[in-house]
Structure formats: C-alpha cells, structure tokens
Image: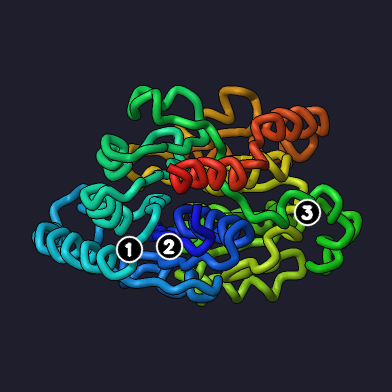
C-alpha cells in the first residue's frame, strides 16, 4: 500500500459529528504522516471553523437537512442536493481519494454518495443507537459501518457492521488522575460538591432555564456550578458569573479538567457526549433533547439508564429535578453504582479500531 494516500472525510453540523472526524484524521495522520486530507462540510455550519482550527483543509457544500415542519427552506432542498452532488463529484474528481469516511451530518450524504458511484471505498461511522436517514441510505453502498451500540443490524447489513465505539478526545482517558488539577484550574472550594452542566456545543435552552431556576437551590445544597451554556446563550447568562458558587462558560476548552473536577454531570445525550461520559465514569443525569431526528438522544440515554449507568430525566419531567438531584447528591452508594456501571460501557479504543477498519479498505 502506498504511503502517500488521499483521505476524504465528511461530517459536521454539530460537535458530535466534527470531533470524531478530527479524531479519526489525527490517528490516520500518525500512521501515515505523508497522507493528504480533505474535509467536506456544510458551508454555513461550525465545521467550517473547527476543522481549520484542527489543521485540516475543508470545502463547504450548499446543503442542509429537511425540517420536520414545513418551512421555506424545505423548498430549496432539491436544489441544494443537486448542487451538492455536483460539487462533491467535482471535489472527488480533483482530489482523487483512496477512501471516503463519513461521520454524519448533512454534507456526508452527497459526498459519500458520489464517492461510492466513482468506486471509492467508503466507511461510515454511526455514533447513535438509532441512525438517521442519511446513514441508513449510505449503508447500502458502504463497505464498512462502525457503530457504538448493539442491535444495529435492524438498520444496517449485519456483515458490514463493526462495533468500535465512538472516538473521543484522548486527554479524557486520564481524567481520573486529574481531580486535584481540575479543581485548582476552576478555583473550586475544596469542600464543596461540584456539578458540571453540558448542553452541547451550541447550548440547550431548556437545560439553561432549568439551571437558572435552581441557582438558589444549588447554593443551599452547597454545590458549585460549572455551567457551559453554549455560544447562543452566553450573553444572556454570563451575568451569573457574579455569584460566588457559579461559573458560566460559553465553551470549555479543557473538558478533561472540567470532567475531572465534577462530582455529578448534567448533560444532553448526544452520541459523543455519551461516549465521553462512559469513559469519564462520573454520575450523570441525562436530559436528552427531544428536538432531534428520530428522538435519538432519548434512545442513547435510555441505553445507559436501562443498565443502571445513569439517570434519565426527560424535558417533560423537569419539575422533579430538585428531588432527583438532592437524592443523588446525598446518596454516595448510588453515585458509586452509577459511576461503575457507566464506566463498564466505555470503549476507549474506538479511534484505533475505526482506523484499523479504514486501513483494511486502503489495503484492498
């Protein structure tokens, strides 16, 4: 197999699709330092910023998903798809990739469709317990499908499935040894319990409203709050930084130290978040977003909660949050059980396993 290879990667829309793509690229770059990489994303999404920050070139397509309710944007979808298929074909012709990898998101559809039509081996990485329409369609032509959950043969050809887990940031593998460093980094009171609030890279309105409504409650419980509210909401919530027990962040650049400092974590249930939290092994309250395709966040969270690895609290049940939280913060036995059970579901070698599958395609 030649050492100078061309690797095309498409994925984006959210951090849950972007960071796995970067992790896969980084591992491939370690193995093939002379490889050429090109990312394809949606031109108005966050990958257009995050991929160059990671040191890779990206080209944007004019593509977006279909909204579940009727909107004017839906009328443009056929034109966007035709445009994106044409541009993806041109990209592939010019770049001549040896393999194409899709990690989900709007742009991966047209990119991998055109790669498959041109005879380029394709691999898709499905992060969720319930796949979206794009990956279901792509799976028919893909050579390999790397998944993080069991029982996905309901949606994909069984002979193509490899259970690898989801790629995570490598610095998270050592969070258990960084507790002192993490608490010092966030200047936390040594005696107080700490909760970490994660609403996803863009933020979560319902979770932010829940935390705002319970700031006095957390103070009474002598709990410190590390609150990632997301870039859409930071201007609204940064005023709470004036409170001694609260830290509001638009984005957390040291997630390893945030996880290390936390005693309890409140989080959405995107696939990457779930995979990271399994590795971190802290007690988690999942509040899944109901506003995602096929309600896949609820399914992700339920797959952990059913094995007694986390607490699942739906947005329709948020009035019970103070009781749920106070019960958990006082029950050290419950915290220990949740931590042990969620950690048993971790797949820390996911990136290596996925890249091993990519290498098999390259050898062919």
Q: Quadrant of residue 298 in the image?
A: top left
Residue at figure coordinates x 32%, y 42% from the top left: 135
**Could you give the CA–CA distance between mark 3 and mark 2, rounded to whole angstroms?**
38 Å
Q: Earlier in the sequence, mark 2 or mark 1?
A: 2
Within-10-Å neighbours for mark 3: few <14, some 14–19, many 20+: many
Find numbered disc 2 in the image and state the secondary structure of the residue it sits on: strand
Front: mark 3 or 1: 1
x and y percentages locating residue 133 in the rendered image: 27, 41
Answer left or right for 293 relative to 341: left
Front: mark 3 or 2: 2
Vertical side of 159 occupied by 93: above or below:
below
Vertical side of 322 occupied by 333: above or below:
above
Marks 3 and 1 close (CB-CB < 8 Å): no
Q: Which residue is mark 3?
A: 260
x and y percentages locating residue 317 in the rendered image: 49, 37
- The residue furthest front is 1
Answer left or right for 79 relative to 203: left
x and y percentages locating residue 263 in the rendered image: 77, 47
Within-10-Å neighbours for mark 1: few <14, some 14–19, many 20+: some
Q: Which residue is mark 2?
A: 6
Q: Which residue is mark 1?
A: 96
Find numbered disc 3 in the image and state the secondary structure of the residue it sits on: helix
**Camera-nearest residue between 209 and 284:** 284
């Amino acid at each position: 197999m030649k050492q100078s290879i061309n690797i095309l990667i498409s994925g984006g829309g959210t951090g849950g699709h972007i960071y796995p793509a970067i992790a896969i690229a980084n591992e491939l770059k370690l193995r093939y330092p002379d490889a050429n990489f090109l990312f394809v994303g949606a031109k108005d999404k966050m990958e257009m910023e995050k991929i160059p920050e990671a040191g890779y070139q990206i080209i944007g397509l004019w593509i977006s998903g279909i909204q579940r309710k009727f909107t004017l944007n839906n009328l443009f979808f056929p034109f966007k798809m035709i445009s994106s298929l044409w541009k993806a074909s041109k990209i592939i012709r010019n770049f001549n990739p040896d393999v194409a990898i899709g990690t989900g998101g709007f742009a991966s559809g047209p990119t991998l469709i055109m790669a498959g039509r041109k005879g380029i081996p394709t691999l898709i990485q499905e992060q969720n317990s319930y796949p979206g329409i794009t990956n279901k369609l792509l799976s028919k032509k893909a050579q390999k499908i790397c998944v993080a959950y069991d029982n996905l043969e309901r949606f994909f050809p069984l002979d193509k499935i490899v259970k690898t887990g989801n790629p995570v940031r490598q610095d998270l593998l050592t969070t258990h040894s960084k507790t002192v460093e993490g608490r010092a980094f966030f200047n936390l009171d040594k005696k107080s319990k700490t909760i970490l609030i994660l609403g996803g890279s863009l933020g979560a309105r319902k979770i932010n409203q829940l935390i705002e409504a319970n700031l006095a409650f957390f103070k009474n419980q002598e709990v410190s709050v590390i609150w990632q509210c997301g870039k859409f909401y930071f201007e609204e919530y940064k005023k709470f930084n004036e409170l001694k027990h609260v830290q509001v962040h638009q984005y957390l650049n040291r997630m390893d130290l945030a996880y290390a400092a936390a005693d309890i974590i409140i989080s959405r249930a995107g696939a990457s978040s779930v995979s990271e939290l399994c590795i971190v092994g802290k007690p988690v309250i999942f509040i899944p977003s109901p506003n995602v395709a096929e309600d896949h966040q609820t399914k992700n969270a339920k797959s952990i909660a059913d094995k007694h690895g986390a607490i699942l609290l739906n947005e329709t049940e948020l009035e019970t949050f103070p009781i749920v939280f106070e019960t958990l913060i006082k029950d050290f036995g419950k915290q220990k059980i949740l931590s042990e059970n969620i950690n048993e579901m971790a797949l820390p070698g996911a990136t290596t396993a996925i890249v091993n599958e990519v290498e098999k395609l390259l050898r062919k």
